[in-house]
Amino acid sequence: MALMTPEQFEESLKKLKPKVYMNGKQVEDILENRNTRTVVEANKASYAWALDPRYKDIMTCHSLLIDDAVNRYTHVSAGTEDLVKKAEAGTFTAEMLGTCIYRCAGYDAFHSLAGTTWEMDRDLGTEYHPRFLEYLKMVQTKDLAVAGALTEPRGSRSKKTLDWPDPYLSLKIVDKNKEGIVVRGAKINISGAYASHELAVLPQAAHFKGEEDYAVAFATPVDADGITFVCQYTPYSAERDMAEDIEELGNPVFGQRETSMVVFDNVFVPWERVFHCGEYAYSGKLVSRFARTHRMTCGGTCKVGFMNQIIGASKLIQEYKGLEKATHINDQLMEMVVLRETSRACGLAAAHKGTEEPLGSGVFLPDEIMGNVSKLNVCNAFWRVMALAGDIGGGLIVTLPSLKELKNPEVKDFVEEFYSFGSDEPTENIMKVHKLLQNWTAGLHGVGTWHGAGPVMAQKIMLQRVIDYEHEKNLVKQTLKLKEKK
Amino acid sequence: MALMTPEQFEESLKKLKPKVYMNGKQVEDILENRNTRTVVEANKASYAWALDPRYKDIMTCHSLLIDDAVNRYTHVSAGTEDLVKKAEAGTFTAEMLGTCIYRCAGYDAFHSLAGTTWEMDRDLGTEYHPRFLEYLKMVQTKDLAVAGALTEPRGSRSKKTLDWPDPYLSLKIVDKNKEGIVVRGAKINISGAYASHELAVLPQAAHFKGEEDYAVAFATPVDADGITFVCQYTPYSAERDMAEDIEELGNPVFGQRETSMVVFDNVFVPWERVFHCGEYAYSGKLVSRFARTHRMTCGGTCKVGFMNQIIGASKLIQEYKGLEKATHINDQLMEMVVLRETSRACGLAAAHKGTEEPLGSGVFLPDEIMGNVSKLNVCNAFWRVMALAGDIGGGLIVTLPSLKELKNPEVKDFVEEFYSFGSDEPTENIMKVHKLLQNWTAGLHGVGTWHGAGPVMAQKIMLQRVIDYEHEKNLVKQTLKLKEKK
Amino acid sequence: MALMTPEQFEESLKKLKPKVYMNGKQVEDILENRNTRTVVEANKASYAWALDPRYKDIMTCHSLLIDDAVNRYTHVSAGTEDLVKKAEAGTFTAEMLGTCIYRCAGYDAFHSLAGTTWEMDRDLGTEYHPRFLEYLKMVQTKDLAVAGALTEPRGSRSKKTLDWPDPYLSLKIVDKNKEGIVVRGAKINISGAYASHELAVLPQAAHFKGEEDYAVAFATPVDADGITFVCQYTPYSAERDMAEDIEELGNPVFGQRETSMVVFDNVFVPWERVFHCGEYAYSGKLVSRFARTHRMTCGGTCKVGFMNQIIGASKLIQEYKGLEKATHINDQLMEMVVLRETSRACGLAAAHKGTEEPLGSGVFLPDEIMGNVSKLNVCNAFWRVMALAGDIGGGLIVTLPSLKELKNPEVKDFVEEFYSFGSDEPTENIMKVHKLLQNWTAGLHGVGTWHGAGPVMAQKIMLQRVIDYEHEKNLVKQTLKLKEKK
Amino acid sequence: MALMTPEQFEESLKKLKPKVYMNGKQVEDILENRNTRTVVEANKASYAWALDPRYKDIMTCHSLLIDDAVNRYTHVSAGTEDLVKKAEAGTFTAEMLGTCIYRCAGYDAFHSLAGTTWEMDRDLGTEYHPRFLEYLKMVQTKDLAVAGALTEPRGSRSKKTLDWPDPYLSLKIVDKNKEGIVVRGAKINISGAYASHELAVLPQAAHFKGEEDYAVAFATPVDADGITFVCQYTPYSAERDMAEDIEELGNPVFGQRETSMVVFDNVFVPWERVFHCGEYAYSGKLVSRFARTHRMTCGGTCKVGFMNQIIGASKLIQEYKGLEKATHINDQLMEMVVLRETSRACGLAAAHKGTEEPLGSGVFLPDEIMGNVSKLNVCNAFWRVMALAGDIGGGLIVTLPSLKELKNPEVKDFVEEFYSFGSDEPTENIMKVHKLLQNWTAGLHGVGTWHGAGPVMAQKIMLQRVIDYEHEKNLVKQTLKLKEKK
């Protein structure tokens, strides 16, 4: 069987030497650095679940490509049942980790590449599809973790790509030769890629005549020459660096949400890993098919999992405070559940109404309208859930002293006494649950959830493109028996 | 085949003589009175669709009970596929009529009675279930239209049923004998029942020891002795009464939404039509199973159909005004679509996640949480859609002169000229579409949608009852490795 | 003293013979027709209050122009105290009538004309300002009711005025001579003008070179030759026409909200009543100053009065039902109060922050940003208040039978019994309060409130024009000590 | 003149030796510790402004008590003009600091104490009022910074104070003698108190018979024996501790928002500083008058200042990205302005409608309803503003690398290139403005704003207490001419 154990996964990472910088310094070992370690742990968990009898139904499936069980995150959906499972896996991984599974964008990139390479070959006679399938077989056989990368720095939004002063603000082919291509540019806001084996790189935007060099998609090992990761560094990174014990933190093992800018400074990619190269008319399709897949999961269903963590912590604090019968708290908890179930419903509906795209490709994508609706709803829902959790958690969420004070002989008795709520719950537990809510309500997730899978405007633009009003207009014409035009 | 033609349906109604009052006078013939006629037309349409090849898939299904095709509105769902079809039928009928199909509450009452009579028989050794099945066979074989009735006048909400000064503010058994029972009381806000063949009557609320006489469910012809319908009379009723031609109206054929109070003044019901009689512990189950079914449809999916009418009219007005490129209008139309799709998603998810209830009964009901979430969302969504349509439609929606002015020689030229928007659309069309939006945004539907299937508090109470937080709490405990209690 | 008694007002109307059409027929006497009578009653009330010691402080003020007490609705605000009183009067009249005081747009037109005629004279050497003051003195001395008129039919919004197929879709000067001007066109959605003495007519929009003939403002008696009123006719009009007794209606005396299209078919206006004629650069100022004044009142403060009616009725129904202790109802009532107070606050703040505009004119207008904010908030707030009142009122609001049933011997006992809520309140009262809420929640007010003083887009455009971000940007630059640009 | 220079203020702090703990260790010098220093800086600024000709009108006023100019934050409002200035000062300090002025709760405590001591003396013959005035004179004369403290740990909310296992979960008098009283307990979530001279301590809640020992209010120096400050420690604290240069941070000088738990472990307070001692019937008044004052400022107007920082940064990012013409961004900025102006309006209206409370005391408090409305609105508005800023700021707000990377020779060129947006703005500026938005949208302010001046439930409870519906009910009765009850 192709599946690696978590230990094998960790060993496999040791063989890679990605060039990673954080907080002004190089990260010598991503398995050791406290912040990069959280990404290792999250991806590692996905290997453990695939072998765990309790979770293998959701985390694995049978691949016809290699006729073997594979991790679901390497599989391209071939029907609506696959999509429903994909939606459920989005929730499962998110609620188990309390943060991203960093393999999600790669999984979605596979969906986009599978269909679009098939379509390019059909339309243009290129040979991208078999090349991609070979690549995917390799990924499945070796059970690799693959991160996806789309977002780019970009120049002024009021100017076109070709008018930007720096041509590399979008990733660009700078050389082509018999062996392959050389690219320069950067991808930004890329989730946890350095702890994967591979990067699947797609364009960020539609391209047009003259922009052929920007129309490029490929895969590359994370430690290819010329790749540099410049990591985010947030207050939560600093807190993790300074902690005496990760148990002090709001999400001890898996952390907040880690990203980096991935710089491609003249990186060589051999042809067998190039899946799109100059056919600008298909760049937009690669993006929009990725988005169509990603919006169901990242937009909708994984936030169901996040909300579960928030709801659980809010419920615990209600109990610690003796507020089980407070109507307004129960009402707020219920409002969170309603928002969560609405997200779940949109994700499920997107999956159930999924269709083959493009027709004949064998690749199934979630319903376009429903996926975008899912993401639009979750943007607002998530901030609202944060606000509600903040209400229930109370000011203490953001005014909590360090858990270190529980070991500080001069104040620990005070802390034990005055943060106990007079309950029989260990004060340490009470403080930790508050810390977890701090992690959710005073951290990166509000903005992160909004922008993951694109900000609302991206969904709105897509909806404007696909909504058709003929059915609705005809209903009115029929109801009113309207006359023909003059 | 059991299915009646629409003409047969109309003939069948003529044989019934329900006692109906409206606007202070008796309605001599519900087929002739302009306002009651709208209900006849709506129900009649459901007979036409069942025979129409375009719609029979959605409007009919095979009944194992009589081994024949039956109208879906007489069928009890036996699996999630039935529930998905039921959800789709809710949208279909609503968008075709632009108002209620008045058979929906009866359809849902069947779901509740099927499961609960089975359960009572199992638990108590009663014989309600076979009796109900016999009744249902008769309904299917004769292809009858059956209205449902639950809501009651009630007394002060701060007092218990037995403490109300008038015992009949909830429907009550006043006599029992060998042949059957006699009931007195009233059901209020009952949708369009007088143009059905039968009424299926359930309790409105859970009942308790001492309230055995209120624990009653039965079926009765609409013209049984002692039944009186006192119809609503709204500004829209007056307008229809006064119109020279129904084409002047916002929904010419099917009208706004018609209800009545149904008074039961010592009505006799024979035992073979009594399905619940004194077993108070099951009254609440009858209500909550009805609600569970009704909230998916009336709460969620039929409003998708209503919104389609509103969206279509808004789009037409946008075009009449030459506003196709106005960003803010396109944004508002899209917002309506997002609200509509969210309703659709919740309805579909409720159906897909439906379960057998009670286990072993063979009756499938939508997912309880999702159905309630569906209804909660739609309450707010519908008012918002009204507001958005009001914005697009403009002040003219509510300031429109009568369409009669188009025939008034003294002003018709002015009206033609000044309501044309300078477009090549007939002014009559423009005025009619505005009239249709008046019907939706300045009529009964805001309040009606909110209260159909129960007001938000009913959904909240049910959600409070069924939501369980153990899964979520355990996720947090696992993430933080919380200690045991002191 | 200049003030007329209400009886004198009614007499004075009898001398005017406006040409009015409604529901396909001419209205012979606006004092007799049931629907036009509501407008007469509303305006008449404003004469009564001015003489009532309880209300004269709010309804009158001293005019320096004629050195006498005048009705506030003929006065131009000369300071922020006047504006505060104006805001309070907006609330007072609205809550007393439960609908519009139809003198409000005229009042606001005076504010716009007073400042802009002064400015035109200063800039262009015209003589509009003294002419307007003479007109205003006459209005004050005779204590006339003056309606304002701006909104026009317009052609395709994607074309310019001069490109519309019909040049009269905006009101246009078609002739000028020594005595005056002749205009053709129409004003639509005009509130209750036929029961005023005079119309003050402003342009609807900014005008540009070539559109001089559209740049026109003037006053005219309502019965000038060529003026025709084509009245709205809504379900509520039909209901009033059909009522046996106006006590059956939701707002018996003052009705819903009456408007008409006012057609100007070659109407002559003498020069002494022309206040703007061709100076297109000032058309936009006339509109925006009107809007600036109108948004505080019509946008904000009068809706406080409407909400008071809605809140009062909701509270009464809560009590009738015995729901005084229901937390969720109390919460909803409070939410209505919060929305109402927010409207009040924005209106008051607009008044307190009002400024002289243009500088030197002596005319005070409310703060531009705050007035627009007030209107934007109220658009959403009012629909929300409607939804909440609909929840509290219950389905009965829209399913209520006619009050005539209380006199129908065949059903009156049932109606008395089953709509009593088992309370000691007369059933007639209960039904009437429901009818009043029907009037508010299932009528014209949602759309009407949104569009009164212009739809949200109008406010947004104005805000985009006046908001300046320099102060805010400088705060950030100072906090971060940002460097100069490269 | 009584006013200290900022340097004198800093010197004066050096003489105090409060016992402060943070992150498990004692803070040796609050002027040196990076996190406590932010509080020193914020308070220090208030001394500078008072002497700055640009700001002295807002930051100072004349005290009749000492017949001299005093810092406004030591003054008790004696009329609505004072309240308007107080509201404006709330905005001014907040926008200048980008965080709290830590003197605000003390300022509001003075308002509460001034009126309630007067009332106790009048009702009970106590002598608290002159004692308090002596204290206030001393504060004004010495120009002291005084923090306020109310919130307490509390035990189970389902139990009464006297039933908590630990009697000190609310602050309690444990001894009384001739010289004064001794108290034990804690105050939590106390804003920045350690960098003030004094603490003004009020009860947190109403008290009842048997709870006399909890009915206590007093003032104390921050370094009195037995007082210990246990400071919050958040990710932002860690980040500040780890920064090489505070210029890396989102609010370099003034920080996020600092609080601590203040433990009173048998603290002695001499009688001349005790203002409430056992008169439990007045404890609730002390709390509610504090809240009434605090909700206008902390609830409403200071958030106007915070929003100004957020709006300014969002606008700058829009410009950096070349999105000046993006309709949806302009719409979002406008929405922020509307939310801000609504907050401002409610605050201003609360001030303008302020009243003397209690009557005869000479103390003016903001309007109770309006102040609570202000706070309720801002709770939701602030989260919405955060969400909108997050949209405009983009994912980069939370994925930004450390500003240290600009000095890291291995990546600085990449960072300069790829975070430039191709604009001519220094990349450092761009990164800093993103960092400032991180500070606002991924930090403590969402939860902090919600809970400052009490969570929404506190406002709702107060509104329920003071809203009266008689006026509104009477309007309806008059409109409908309702009959008397049966």
Image (cartoon, coloured by chain):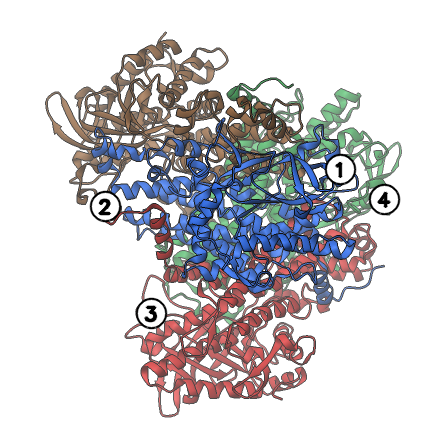
Chain colours: A blue, B red, C green, D brown
Identified at 51% across, 46% down, the residue is A102
Are the residues under badges 2 and 3 in a single subunit?
no
Residue D406 sits in which quadrant? top right
Amino acid type indicated by mark 2: Ser
- Left or right side of D251 for C256: right
Report how far apart the C-alphas of labels 1 and 2 lie in the structure.
Answer: 70 Å
User: In front: C99, or C447?
Assistant: C447
Pointer 4 residue: C167
Marks 3/4: CA–CA distance: 68 Å
- Name the amino acid type tagged 1: Pro
* Inter-mark Cα distance, 1 to 4: 15 Å
Of labels 1 and 4, earlier in sequence is 4
Q: Is mark 4 on a helix, strand or loop?
A: helix
Q: Where is residue A99 in the image (x, y as percent from the top left)?
A: 46, 45
Q: What residue type is labelled 4?
A: Pro
Q: Mark 4 lies on which chain?
A: C
Q: State which mark lies toward you, 4 or 2.
A: 2
Quarter the N terminus of chain C occupies:
top right
Residue marked by disc 3: B161
Residue C425 in the image: x percent, y percent? Answer: 39, 61
Q: Quadrant of residue D364?
A: top left
Give the residue number, with chain letter if any, for mark 1.
C203
Q: Which residue is drawn at 77% across and 55% down?
A: A123
Label 2: which residue?
Answer: A423
